[in-house]
Amino acid sequence: MSFVDKADVEIKAGTGGNGCISFRKEKFIDHGGPDGGDGGRGGDVIFEANNNEDTLANFRYLRELAAKNGESGAHRRQHGKNGSDLVVAVPTGTIILGDGGKVLADLSSDHSRAVIAKGGDGGFGNAHFVSSVRQAPKMAEKGEPGEKLRVTLELKLIADVGLVGLPNAGKSTFLSVVSSARPEIADYPFTTLTPNLGVSDLSGGPSLLIADIPGLIEGAAEGKGLGDEFLKHIERTLVIIHIIDAYNDDVAKAYKTIEAELKAYSSDLTTRPQVIALNKTEGLDTDIIEDLIKQIKTVAPKSSKVMPISAKSLAGIKTLLEQVGSMVMNAKKTLDNYANETIDQIPVLTLTDTGEAFNVEKRGDGGSYLVTGKKIEKFAVRTSPGSEQGIRRLKDIMKKMGITHELARQGAVAGSIIDIGGIIKFGL
């Protein structure tokens, strides 16, 4: 299966079932009481991270995801069946983005879940509306529509270590000898076209999850070569191994080129703990290796370690992994300590959004008014336009909420057309 790390999908939660209008029909009882049941709730759309998934390729052609609708209520107060939730498995590390790139969920751990679209509530049947003054209600609510939205799924691999370097620096060979991963290896640039993951157990310490990022070239941030589209996969890594080909004409320039591209993508990447691995040293004399290391140190941060290795002969590999393993452990401890810190904060008092707020707007024609608000629109969705008792109930709700008073203040009179959120219209 091809590697895909970004996909756009439409998701739709289930619509709630309609309430039922029904009256008991029993032998010797001509007019039984109302017994219409409520509709079932629509199913949610839930995304769940799964370590067994490693690509978003399944969503390349699957552009729409929909949960089941709730079933309508029935006579004898039978409640409609709730619609089943749709649980969508995505790779661990998937970020779900909404309008404007807003992060709706970051599924960064195995089995973490997030409800992205909520199903609509089922409508009440007429048995729900029985009261001392309304003993035979002939109305029932419609089910609410489920939430519908377009989201972008973006995968950022979760790895301890990220490998970066120019094309043909030997990153794929390195990954193949320290793990069981089998990336494509050849003697031409851009052999690696997609990120590869491997688990290294050669250090004798904890396992290291290593991500091999396709080769960067100068100008990658402007889209040259493979561009910087895969650099997002090392944003979560704790340590970076910068691999440099010892046979490069200018090893210092090779290092500066990659560092410049990392900085152009995100300045945070250049401050990440790193080890510089001078690769392909198996055929070089010691004095040549030392000279190359000195050249790299003239442009690298003083805190960076430069270590000669040979992915082909395995020279220096164990020492490098031990060093990286220690750095990863220290980075994890730092993160744990940061997470456990207690930060004293001044409490901020804010107004609680109860959903009771509404807005009344007089339209230009002078005879109609637009009413908007979360709560009143929720009732409007559930009201059938053809139900006289339903409209009457909606008017009662408007009166209790103070909407009727505001309409009168703005000049509404009997017969004025009231439009609630573009959902339902009726005369006042």
Image (cartoon, rainbow, N blue to C red):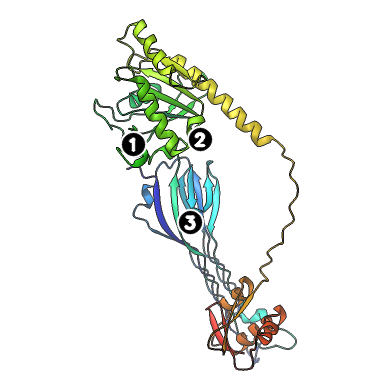
Q: Secondary structure at mark 1?
A: loop
How far separated are the C-alphas under marks 1 and 3?
27 Å
Q: Is residue 310 visible?
A: yes
Please rate how many residues cluster around mark 2, counting C-alpha atoms within 10 Å: few if below 14, some from 14 to 19, many from 20: few
Task: Tell me if label 2 and label 1 are in contact, CB under 8 Å.
Answer: no
Check disc 3 and report the residue beneath it: 100
Residue visible at 72% across and 58% down in the picture? 350
Tell me if residue 128 comes above or below residue 415 in the rendering.
Answer: above
Q: Position of residue 167 (x, y in %)?
A: 31, 29
> Callout 3: 10 Å neighbours few (<14), some, many (20+)?
few
Callout 3–callout 2 Cβ contact below 8 Å? no
Instruction: Please report the residue visible at 51 percent of the width from the left and 30 percent of the height from the top.
Output: 271
- Residue 197 as seen in the image, left or right of residue 268: left
Q: Nearer the viewer, residue 275 or 183?
A: 275
Identify residue for label 2: 268
- Identify residue type, mark 2: Asp
Nearer the observer, disc 2 or disc 1? 1
Q: Of marks 2 and 1, which one's residue comes earlier in the chain?
A: 1
Quadrant position of residue 306: top left
Q: Residue furthest front?
A: 298
Image quadrant containing the N terminus: top left
358 horizontally vs 295: left or right? right
Q: Is residue 132 above or below residue 357?
A: below
**What x and y, as percent, mark residue 67?**
48, 62
Element under disc 3: helix
Compute the Cα span from label 3 to label 2: 23 Å
Which circle, 1 or 3, is nearer the viewer? 1
Residue 36: where, in percent of width, then height?
Answer: 61, 80
Tell me the residue that label 1 is attached to.
Answer: 219
